[in-house]
Image: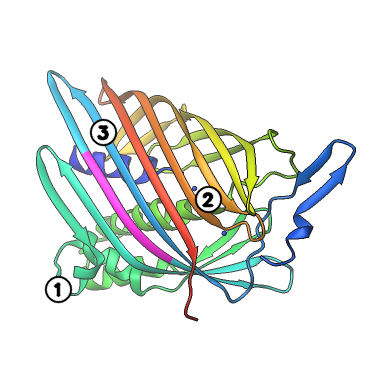
Amino acid sequence: MKIYFEVVVLLLFAASCKTHPNSDRRYDYSKDGQSYALRLDPVPGSEYVYAIHNESEVKMEVGDRKMDDVNKSDVSTVYSTGRDSIGDFIMGMTYEKVHLYVKNNGEESEMDAANAGSSINPIERMLGALQSAHVEARISPAGEVKSVTGYKEIGEKILGQFHAPDSYSQNLAKQRVEQVIGEGIVKRNMDQLFRIFPDSAKHIGESWHLHSVQKGDVSLQVNSTLTLRSIEDEVAFIDAESELTSDSGTSQLMGYDAIADLKGHQKGEYQVETATGMLLSCEMTGTVEGTLQIMGRNVPVTIDTKLNMNGRLKTGK
C-alpha cells in the first residue's frame, strides 16, 4: 500500500493558497460605500519568493491493522513576472528547494532535490530534474491558469536516465511524472496561488464562491466560499472555507479499480497585497474522511492536512 499512500498524500491534499503603485484603481465607490476590485496585477519584471510547507497525516484501517502515515514537504519557488500582448501574465518558475519527508509503516525516509546528482532514488532524481527545468505559466488577470509548459520534458529526461525496458514501464514512468510533478506540484501550486479572485468588486464582509477540481488518482470536487474580512495597510484579509467530496466514478490505484467515498472540510486565511494580487501568506487546515473500496473491501480513511505559504518580493535585483 506504500505507493498508494504516497499518491493520495502528494496528489489529493498538497492542500490550498497569494502579492503597488496605482492602487487607487482597486477601489470603487457607490451609494453602498467603498468596494474593492481584487485581481492579479504584479509589476512586470518583478520576482516573488514563496516558501510552501505541507503536512499530511493518513490514518487507515486495513482489517485489524491500523496504519498512521505522515508526509511533509518543503518547497521554495521563485516566480518571475512578465506580461504578453493580450494582457495575460507570464510566470516563470524556478524551484530553489524541494524536500520531502515520509513516515510509512514506522519507517522514515527523506528525499531532497539537492541530492539528485549522486542519488539512485528515482524520486530524488525527478525532483532534481524539476529544479533544472524551465517551467512557465500563462495566467489571466482573473487568476485563470491558461497553460503550463516546461514540466513534461522532465519525464523524457528521467526516462533517458533509467532506460525503462518496455512500453508499459515507460508509460508508467510518464504517468508518475505527471502525477508527482505536473498535477502534484506545478499545476496545483498555480491554482493555490491565483484562483481566489472574485469576478466583481466586493465590499468588506461580502463573499464569493469558487468551484474547482483537485485532480489525482482520486479526484475531489472543491466548493469554496471566500469572504473579504478586512483591508489593512493595502493588504486584503480573506477567510476561506471549502467543502470537498470525491468523484463518484471509478479510479485506478495500483492497477486496481477503486471507488472513493470521501468528504471533508477545509478552512483558513489568505493575506493578499491589494495592488498586485500576489500572496503574502496563507494558512489552511483540513480533514477528509470516508472509505476507499479496493478489491471489494471498504477501507476507512482519515486524512488531516496543514498548509503554510509565505511570499515576498525578491530584493537585490
Please, what is the three-letter code of the amino acid marked with disc 3? Val
Viewed as shown, does residue 197 lie left or right of 201?
left
Q: Is residue 160 above or below residue 40?
A: below
Q: Which residue is mark 1?
A: 118
Which of the two discs, 1 and 3, labels the residue nearer the N terminus?
3
> Could you tell me which secondary element the residue under label 2 belongs to?
helix
Q: Quadrant of residue 203?
A: top right
Residue lying at 51% horizontally and 40% vertically, measured from the top left: 269
Give the spatial CA distance, label 1 vs label 3.
Answer: 31 Å
Residue lying at 40% horizontally and 55% vertically, measured from the top left: 185
Q: Position of residue 235 (x, y in %)?
A: 61, 51
Q: Position of residue 317 (x, y in %)?
A: 50, 81
Q: Which residue is mark 3?
A: 58
Give the spatial CA distance, label 2 vs label 3.
Answer: 23 Å
Which of the two discs, 2 and 3, labels the residue nearer the N terminus?
3
**Does the stretch in magenta take in 75?**
yes
Which of the two discs, 2 and 1, labels the residue nearer the N terminus?
1
**Does the stretch in magenta take in 272?**
no
Viewed as shown, does residue 58 lie left or right of 103?
right
Please, what is the three-letter code of the amino acid marked with disc 2? Asp
Q: Which residue is mark 2?
A: 191
Residue lying at 74% horizontally and 65% vertically, measured from the top left: 22
> Which residue is at the far front?
233
Viewed as shown, does residue 5 lie left or right of 232?
left
The residue range painted magenta reads: 70-77
Please, what is the three-letter code of the amino acid marked with disc 1? Ser
> Could you tell me which secondary element the residue under label 1 belongs to?
helix
Q: Is residue 175 above or below residue 214?
A: below
Give the spatial CA distance, label 2 vs label 1.
Answer: 33 Å
Q: Nearer the viewer, residue 256 or 211?
A: 211
**Which label number is shown at residue 192?**
none
Q: Nearer the viewer, residue 172 or 37?
A: 37
